[in-house]
Amino acid sequence: MALDATFFALVGLVIFLLLVVFLKVPGTVGKSLDARADRIRDELEEARRLREEAQSLLAEYQRKRKEAEKEATEIVAIAQREAHGLFEEARKKTEEYVVRRNKLAEQKIAQAEVEAVNEVRASAVDIAIAAASRILADKVDTKTSSDLFKSSLTEVKSRLN
């Protein structure tokens, strides 16, 4: 057998393989790979769990958003109904106020008409009395005046009693 380079390469290879087996490198490499596989498996499981949790949170937030939108829509509808009701109430109160003010104005006008008519009557009576007193003063002398006064006084006394 010749001791050439291939022989020394074979011996080096055999020594290397024995050293690898003696130092239990395949077991260590296997344990290392198993540990890494377990870590990767745990990370994948954690990622799956986080994804499911995120999806459930997303679904919950979407449900809450829909409920909030529905509630907001209901609140807007209620506010519109209340605003319409307040508007109608204000309109009715305004109409009632206008009707009351018109009636009050009509009553004041009617009262003013009555007062004007009474003033005209009072003026007419005063003018008639003044005219009658002038006519009587011109036509009646003192004796007739005294008789007229006595008869008027008796008539007033009889009516008062």
Image (cartoon, helix red, strand yellow):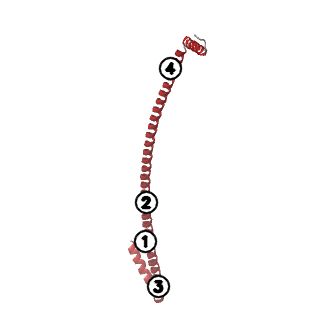
How many residues crowd around disc 4 within 10 Å: few (fewer than 14), some, or many (20 or more)? few
Amino acid identity at mark 4: Asp
Q: Amino acid at mark 2?
A: Arg
**Residue 135 vs residue 117, the one in the foreground:** 117
Q: Earlier in the sequence, mark 3 or mark 4?
A: 4
Q: Which mark is residue 21?
A: none
Q: Secondary structure at mark 2?
A: helix
Q: Residue furthest bottom?
A: 139
Spatial CA distance of label 3 from label 4 is: 141 Å
Q: Residue at x 43, y 60 (%)?
A: 91
Give the vertical position of 6 relative to 127 (above or below). above
- Residue hosting label 1: 110
Q: Amino acid at mark 1?
A: Ala
Q: From the image, state whether disc 1 or disc 4 is nearer to you.
A: 4
Q: Looking at the rendered structure, which numbered label has been put on residue 91?
A: 2
Q: CA distance from mark 1 to mark 2?
A: 28 Å
**Mark 3 lies on residue:** 131
- Give the camera-side residue of 68 and 28: 28
Judged left or right of residue 43, residue 2 is: right
Looking at the picture, tell me which residue is in the foreground, 139 or 88: 88
Residue 139 pos. (x, y %) = 46, 89
Q: What secondary structure is marked by label 3?
A: helix
Quadrant in which the C terminus appears: bottom left
> Residue 41: x, y in percent?
48, 25
CA gap, disc 1 and disc 3 = 31 Å
Viewer-side label of 1, 2: 2
| Residue type pointed to by label 3 | Ala
Q: Residue at x 44, y 86 (%)?
A: 144
Q: How many marks?
A: 4
Q: Which mark is residue 34?
A: 4
How many angstroms separate mark 4 from mark 2 (CA)? 84 Å
